Amino acid sequence: TALYDSDSPVVSLDAKTFKSRVTNDVDAFVLVEFYAPWCGHCKKLAPEYEAAARALKKSKTAATLAAVDCDAHKSLCDAHGVSGFPTIKAFLAGRAKGSGSAYKPETYSGSRDEASIVRFCEDKAKEKHSQDDPLAPRLAYEHAHGFLHHGDVSAVRAILLTSGEAFGSASGASGPAWLASAAVKFKKGKTRTAVFAYARQEDDKGGIARNFGVKDFPALVCARSDGNDNGAFSTLRASELGTKAGDKIRNAKAFVETCVAASSDISNESTNGGLAWKALPSFPPPRRPRKVNDAKYAELTATNARDVCLEGFAGTCVLLLLHAPDGEGSLPEHEALGSLARRYRNDPLSFVWADVSDKHSAACDFVKGFGVDDETMKRAETTPTLLAVKTGTRNRFAVRVVDTTKSTPENSDHSFTTNAYVRFVDDILSGDVQFKPLQTVPEFEPEYLRDASGVVEFDDVLEEEEVEGTSLRFRGDDTASTTLADVDDEEGEEIALDLEIVPDGSEGEEVVADDELR
């Protein structure tokens, strides 16, 4: 179900309306949220996003808040590189027209509350976007590390730090035109001796200027990297740069030429080429793709219970209880659940399922330890139950039963769908699931140690036979052994069995021949 209905102040977009209202209407500022209806963070954002839309409409700010349901319009979200939810992108007024342009919308990374969204829109609505001059483009804080240390580090980096300047001209240059004029001096063919960029203090909360220690604007910084994420920089202060465009071009050229001529072997806190140099500040390196982990999805058994669900797994185990007496072959949700495991493979989750069709099975005894009763397991044939387990310093669990007797968002056709599983997992990740303390972690007992009553029959292992006036009887888990007998196996190694000596001939006792133990 979409998060925004037709009466919402947030405009819901599909491929057709996105093209007409965003791609082609380049004079409008549009903030677009790409969301999934099952996403917990999206659901939390929705009321704040609607409140922001109402506030902007009331203040008559030239901004439109829109949203795209990525479940319903997957290709549209894929086209805009959406890989997580929610993703919010700002399409500034005055951008290049047409889907084939090189225009890239700005990703909103601020707080997801009404006030922050309104403030962001009010600021951006005042801006007119035009294409940067490639000789002096805008530099974002998250790209500063790559700008300084990647590529040909023999070329000096020159960054104009400015504040309060509204760039833009009829020629379409969004940066200061004079900076591009200065940058031309240092380009010969495809070779540059200096690479230019600019950064506004209003963008990225002034992170670049703050790192360079610049407080008076505009100022020009030239930097040299040693190729190992270190280096040095020097600053041309605002008073030295000048106020007129012509003066700025001349002074910037002279300053950068001096930086280029300075020795590449620059020590920090030194003077080289007539300039004072300081250690180059650090900026966060670009994010590297996360390692793709193996998907954790399997049937829960006595063999893997500890490693995928209990003390051996440092995360949350999500267990689906249902009736599948013939294994995965009779599990209609198998493909969907495997897909979910791959989807959440980089989250601290493992996905398992258990057949609870036989109330005497080890799986049933195991889940009873979490308060799941026989009736719930019986109804699991048509009403699957979801169980989440966290073990570690604090052992906790949570149970969710899917009600298939009535239509719900998780169950629109009165049958179990994987949407219920997705919502449960998403609620776990967003902290919306109420976990209960688990006093004792249940054990998953192997089937070969059990019979229908839960007691091991010793005559399944050893033949029944009389032994010189006494009998040896194996004691089940519900009765403690009284004697520990040490005997040798066929190869002479000592083995230990829990046995009790009882009077010979006692009716119904399990009897073992002495020579069978030798």
Image (cartoon, rainbow, N blue to C red):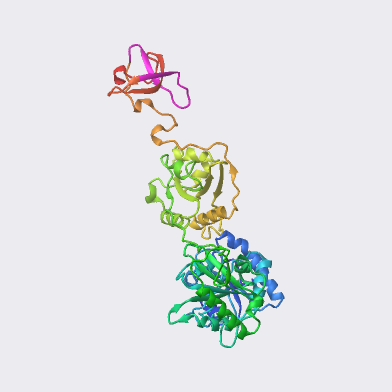
* Residue found farthest to the left: 491
Q: Quadrant of the N terminus?
A: bottom right
Residue 217 position by quadrant: bottom right
Please say whether residue 508 is visible from this viewpoint.
no
On the image, the x and y values in percent for residue 490 come to 28, 23
Q: Position of residue 144 (x, y in %)?
A: 54, 68
Quadrant of the image containing the C terminus: top left
Q: Position of residue 183 (x, y in %)?
A: 52, 80
In the rendered image of this protein, does residue 391 appear above or below residue 73?
above
- The answer to whether residue 498 is left or right of residue 222 is left
At horizontal 56% and vertical 85% (from top left) the residue drawn is 172
Left or right: 319 with respect to 459? right
Furthest residue toward top: 469
Would you say 187 lies left or right of 166 here? left
Is 482 inside the magenta-drawn segment?
yes
Q: Residue furthest bottom?
A: 170
Towards the viewer: 335 or 49: 49
Q: Is residue 379 above or below residue 33?
A: above
Q: Nearer the viewer, residue 436 or 191?
A: 191
Q: Is residue 135 magenta?
A: no
Nearer to me, 426 or 230: 230
The answer to whether residue 147 shows anywhere in this view is yes
Q: In the rendered picture of this protein, how many numbered marks are placed on residues?
A: 0
Horizontal side of 352 relative to 409 (left or right) equals: left
| Quarter-of-image position of residue 307 | top left
Q: Position of residue 57 (x, y in %)?
A: 69, 75
Region rendered in magenta: 467-486
